[in-house]
Image (cartoon, rainbow, N blue to C red):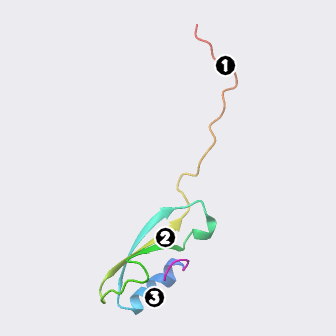
């Protein structure tokens, strides 16, 4: 199971087992998931032949963190 491992360790484990890797990046607000494998496909319990590519989803900080919109300073009335 690669969940919770950092991307480098996951890549090394897959390579040692003769498997390919495809990395999918997924923004996450959970700092504990940044740089870590969140999920893998096929799953950890699936037996696959050597040469199979395993997709790992790795958490990353969102590119555009949420920003607060400034609230209007007064009410605008149409003229």
User: Could you tell me which quadrant the C terminus lies in?
Assistant: top right
Q: Looking at the picture, tell me which residue is in the foreground, 46 or 12.
A: 46
Q: Secondary structure at mark 2?
A: strand
C-alpha span from label 2 to label 1: 45 Å
Q: Most prominent secondary structure in the magenta stretch?
A: loop
Residue 58 marker: 2
Mark nearer the N terminus (2 vs 1): 2
The residue at the point 38 percent across, 83 percent down is 46
* Residue 50, quarter of the rendered image: bottom left
Residue matched to label 3: 13
Residue 3 is one of the magenta-drawn residues: yes
Q: Secondary structure at mark 3?
A: helix
From the viewer's perspective, is 45 left or right of 70? left
Residue 12 position in % (x across, y down): 45, 87
From the viewer's perspective, is 30 left or right of 54? right
* Residue 53, quarter of the rendered image: bottom left
Residue matched to label 1: 75
C-alpha span from label 2 to label 3: 15 Å
Please tell me whether residue 44 is drawn above or below residue 32 in the rendered image: below
Q: Which region of the structure is painted magenta?
A: 1-5
Residue 64 position in % (x across, y down): 54, 51
How many marks do you count on the picture?
3
The residue at the point 70 percent across, 25 percent down is 73
* Residue 61, quarter of the rendered image: bottom right
Q: In the orientation shown, which residue stands out farthest toward the right?
A: 73
């Amino acid at each position: 199971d690669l969940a919770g491992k950092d991307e480098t360790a996951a890549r090394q484990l897959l390579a040692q087992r003769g498997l390919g890797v495809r990395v999918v990046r997924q923004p996450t607000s959970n700092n504990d998931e940044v740089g870590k494998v969140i999920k893998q496909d096929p799953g950890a319990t699936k037996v696959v032949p050597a040469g199979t590519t395993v997709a790992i989803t790795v958490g990353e900080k969102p590119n555009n963190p949420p920003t607060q919109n400034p609230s209007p300073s007064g009410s605008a009335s149409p003229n």
